[in-house]
Amino acid sequence: MSAWIMSSFMFKREDLEKTLEMKLLEIIHELPKVIAVEEDMPIEIFIDSTKKRKTDAAIVIDRKGKISGIVTKLDLLKVLRPVLPHGVRIFSMPLKVRIEKITIKEIMSPNPIMLPETAKVKDAIELMNKYRISHVIITDITGKPKAIISRKYMLKKFFGIEE
């Protein structure tokens, strides 16, 4: 029997290959519900939502209701930059004031990577590695977001690693 040993976990190669070939549709029920935030919202709303829903990402919607980006907990670190993309100096302001003034649009990642729910788990992993991203949006056949799959989820599912 061929097996991979990683940390204290043992995986049968066949089981791992079977999981990688699964359609995203088969694991959507394991993923957190999608949170959607609007571009113009203050980042405080995203912070509160992630705490309440125990998730680390949200889909960003523009004024027309279209997906314009994705925002993750890691994007919050952009708040600590001395200058925002549009040139406003913010380091002289207290952090609380900065957080109140900054919108989702200023820290989000535009043009998020999306996959249809009919794609395979391995496709999501390949895109994460190719684009060095931590999240991929899963959509239904009409393009409506159904879930967000993350590296964190993959690490837990395959290796039992919690971040």
Image: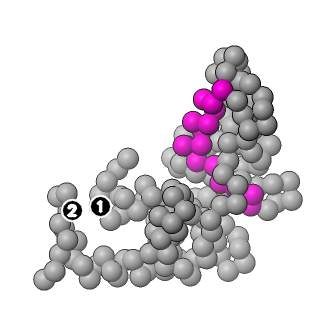
Q: Position of residue 20 (x, y in %)?
A: 39, 77
Q: Is residue 24 above or below residue 47?
A: below
Q: Amino acid at mark 1?
A: Phe
Question: What range is drawn magenta here?
Answer: 67-82
Which residue, as the protein is rendered here, is positioned at the far left? 1
Q: Considering depth in this image, is 59 or 91 the residue closer to the camera?
A: 91
Is 69 covered by the magenta stretch? yes
- Which residue is the site of mark 1? 159
Q: How many marks?
A: 2
Q: Which residue: 45% across, 58% down?
A: 151
Determine crowd level at label 2: few under 14, some 14-19, many 20+ residues with C-alpha closer than 10 A: few
Q: For the N terminus, which image quadrant? A: bottom left
Q: Residue at x 60, y 73 (%)?
A: 115
- Residue 6's tag is 2
Looking at the image, can residue 149 be seen? no
Quadrant housing residue 103: top right
| Residue 6 pos. (x, y %) | 21, 62
Does residue 142 appear in the picture of this structure? yes
**Real-space Cα separation, disc 2 to disc 1, in angstroms:** 7 Å
Residue drawn at (70%, 30%) of the image: 83
Marks 2/1 in contact by CB < 8 Å: the verdict is yes
User: Quick one: SS at disc 2?
Assistant: strand
